[in-house]
Image (tube, coloured by chain):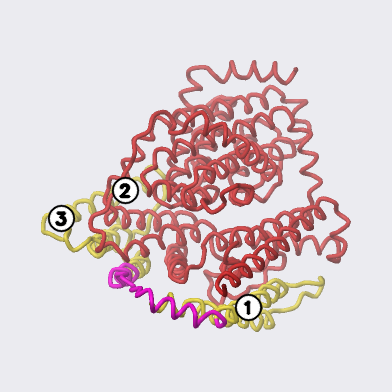
């Protein structure tokens, strides 16, 4: 009850007109940064940080929170409209969002994405407000061994993703792992497969890879029939409200809840992050669905799963950040820096000493979430105007934006060149009918898996010792079970096909 | 035609070579002196899995090749893809990313954007009027992006031979 009262008091102080105005501006700036690939939420926070120096500390923190939330959710706009994930977290949104936009349902897809982003983060903020200290203890129990278990679990999801043509799907995914090896090996920094190239030492950047394999490949693929189809613009069907009925909304709720739990859970573990949680939740939704074949063809449930999970990761990630002072990724590290400048001492004593500040942040999170919903919803009509530009003009403009975005991530021309390389990979995958989703999943999780495996072995000497960790056991055996079950299903399906052909 | 008929063979052979290359490449990596598994462990493991899977794929493809090829020939499938536009786009994109640094963002983008739009444009939309409108879009977009990144996002794009202060 105490928490509730403090949260209420915090709401009152957050909702002052000046602070609201600043937060709206912050969310809007965050959305712009989030929607352009290469401009990340961490960059937005870094740019805004100096501007908050002159503000008083609670206002400064509110603005930082606003930019952060806007930056994470902004990624869905470009993912749906342009097949170009603005941030790595919104990668799985492209799988169903872009097909929906192609079918003329861009407004509906955006509406669904926005609403479920809102709900996902709201869920995680409630968890954050009421259970943060308890959950922080759980986060401490996660050693590299447990993290390896989760990564391994995520990798085996490839088997589910590629059901129907498993061998090709697995091969498609393993190629993603091969790209992870390029660069310095984790732990000891041995250069691998760099062929003496300086630029390859740092490995391939996540975002440039994703941009290449989706956006750049898309340009090449659509070039194939640009002439045959004539001038193309994508139709946009107007929708009322958010574009879905109450009945649909209720039918999506169980999936949304599951995704929000996955997102918050992954968020709590430092170092795994929004892109993995979105993918995991997408695959789980596909696997649990009664109609898995519609996933990837423009199924709203795919958007629900991803957007709910990647936004729920925000609240999850704030838990170790605030309670333990451990930032999980680049953007939370920036946030921690910002909080420290404004006089917050993150750590176990935070809830005892600075309870008012903490609840101020929680309240700001929820209010910013609402602002995000309102801002993005009012702008949907503006966003979809992009689709009025004919494809042969739009696509080159996207490529330039991708190139600039790739350059902005590290100020290296090498990253710009690598988007073309991955664009070619994506095009070849399309030609040989290899699925790109497993590639992306493996690429995102690959280097993490190896790092945790080797770190775990370093601290526990042998792989056998991993099995003394119950949480690891759980993930390991579930993953093995999933793998065996998928292989069994695959073999049975191909046998059935054979007898059918013989008959 | 080629992709449909021989696609899986090409994929299988490519991956078999990749798997072998990984295993051989990993052999050259130093072993870890302090741990059971060193930097060579994962590449070797993945290489072996790739090799096994690619062999399965090749066998699978070979066993159903005849039936599938016959089916394909019967269906009269024809590849209507316009490879001229694909190749043109690819070449111009490769040139673009390589001249970006030495020549600078503004000039290289002005040139690339125009060329790329022209390549992608359907034959019907290549009239004089269209070309003028492409040129206008090209100039406006390039300058807006440059100014936006330079002054709003504080990211300096490669200036090259022509720096805009």
Q: Which mark is residue B56?
A: 1
Give how far across and how far down residue B1 sits, in percent: 38, 77
Q: Residue at x 30, y 64 (%)?
A: A225
Q: Which span of residues is magenta-colored?
A: B62-91
Q: Residues within 10 Å of mark 1 (few under 14, many from 20)?
A: some
In what element is the residue under mark 3?
helix
Please state which of the two labelled residues, at mark 3 or mark 2, is closer to the viewer: 2
Disc 3 from disc 2: Cα separation: 19 Å
Q: Is residue A449 above or below residue A502?
A: above
To which chain does the residue with label 1 belong?
B
To which chain does the residue with label 3 belong?
B
Q: Dominant secondary structure of the magenta stretch?
A: helix
Using residue B121 as the reference point, say whether residue A399 is left or right of it.
right
Q: State the quadrant of the N terminus of chain A.
A: top right
| Residue A159 on the magenta segment | no
Asked whether residue A201 is in view, the answer is no
Are marks 3 and 2 in one subunit?
Answer: no
Give how far across and how far down residue A291 sits, in percent: 56, 49
In what element is the residue under mark 2?
loop
- Provide the letter of the chain coloured yellow: B
Using residue A478 as the reference point, say whether residue A310 is left or right of it.
left
Which residue is denoted by mark 2 in the rendering? A234
- Provide the letter of the chain coloured red: A
């Amino acid at each position: 009850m105490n928490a509730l009262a403090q949260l209420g008091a915090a709401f009152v102080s957050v909702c002052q007109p000046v602070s609201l105005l600043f937060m709206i501006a912050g969310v809007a700036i965050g959305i712009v940064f989030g929607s352009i690939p290469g401009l990340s939420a961490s960059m937005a926070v870094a740019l805004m940080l100096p501007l908050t120096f002159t503000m008083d500390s609670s206002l400064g923190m509110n603005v930082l929170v606003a930019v952060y939330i806007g930056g994470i959710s902004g990624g869905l706009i470009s993912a749906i409209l342009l097949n170009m994930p603005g941030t790595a977290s919104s990668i799985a949104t492209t799988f169903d969002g872009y097909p929906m936009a192609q079918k003329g349902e861009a407004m509906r897809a955006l509406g669904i994405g926005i609403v479920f982003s809102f709900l996902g983060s709201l869920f995680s903020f409630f968890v954050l407000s009421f259970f943060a200290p308890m959950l922080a203890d759980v986060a401490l129990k996660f050693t590299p061994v447990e993290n390896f278990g989760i990564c391994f679990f995520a990798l085996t999801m490839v088997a589910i993703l590629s059901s129907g043509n498993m061998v090709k799907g697995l091969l498609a995914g393993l190629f993603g792992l091969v790209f992870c090896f390029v660069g310095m090996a984790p732990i000891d920094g041995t250069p691998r497969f760099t062929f003496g190239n300086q630029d390859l030492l740092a490995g391939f950047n996540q975002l440039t890879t994703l941009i290449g394999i989706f956006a750049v490949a898309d340009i090449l693929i659509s070039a194939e029939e640009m002439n045959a189809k004539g001038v193309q613009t994508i139709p946009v069907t107007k929708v009322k409200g958010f574009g879905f009925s109450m009945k649909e909304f209720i039918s999506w709720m169980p999936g949304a809840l599951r995704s929000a739990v996955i997102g918050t859970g992954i968020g709590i573990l430092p170092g795994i992050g929004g892109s993995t949680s979105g993918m995991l939740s997408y695959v789980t939704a596909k696997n649990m669905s009664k109609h898995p074949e519609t996933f990837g063809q423009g199924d709203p449930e795919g958007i629900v799963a991803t957007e709910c999970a990647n936004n729920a990761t925000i609240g999850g990630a704030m838990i170790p950040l605030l309670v333990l002072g451990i930032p999980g990724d680049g953007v939370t590290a920036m946030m921690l820096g910002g909080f420290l400048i404004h006089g917050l001492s993150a750590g176990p004593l935070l809830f005892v000493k600075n309870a008012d500040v903490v609840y101020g942040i929680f309240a700001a999170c929820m209010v910013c979430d609402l602002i995000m919903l309102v801002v993005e919803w009012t702008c949907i009509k503006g966003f979809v105007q992009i689709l009025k530009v004919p494809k042969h003009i739009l696509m080159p403009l996207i490529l330039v934006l991708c190139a600039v975005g790739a350059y902005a991530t590290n100020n290296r021309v090498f990253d710009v060149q690598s988007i073309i390389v991955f664009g070619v990979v994506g095009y070849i995958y399309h030609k040989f009918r290899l699925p790109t989703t497993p590639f992306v999943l493996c690429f995102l999780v690959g280097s993490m898996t190896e790092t945790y495996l080797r770190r775990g072995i370093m601290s526990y000497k042998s792989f056998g010792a991993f099995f003394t960790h119950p949480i690891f056991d759980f993930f390991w055996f579930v993953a093995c079970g999933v793998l065996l079950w998928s292989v069994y299903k695959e073999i049975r399906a191909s046998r059935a096909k054979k007898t059918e052909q013989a008959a | 035609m080629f992709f449909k008929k021989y696609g899986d063979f090409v994929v299988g052979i490519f991956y078999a070579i990749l798997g072998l290359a990984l295993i051989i490449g990993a052999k050259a990596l130093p072993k870890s002196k302090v741990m059971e598994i060193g930097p060579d462990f994962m590449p070797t493991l993945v290489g072996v899995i790739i090799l096994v899977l690619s062999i399965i794929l090749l066998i699978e493809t070979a066993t159903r090749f005849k039936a599938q090829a016959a089916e394909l020939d019967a269906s009269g499938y024809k590849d209507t893809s316009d490879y001229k536009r694909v190749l043109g786009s690819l070449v111009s994109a490769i040139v673009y990313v390589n001249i970006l640094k030495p020549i600078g963002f503004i000039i290289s983008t002005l040139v690339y954007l125009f060329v790329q739009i022209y390549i992608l444009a359907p034959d019907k939309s290549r009239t004089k009027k269209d070309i003028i409108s492409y040129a206008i879009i090209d100039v406006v977009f390039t300058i807006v992006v440059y100014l936006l990144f330079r002054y709003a996002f504080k990211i300096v794009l490669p200036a090259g031979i022509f720096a805009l202060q």
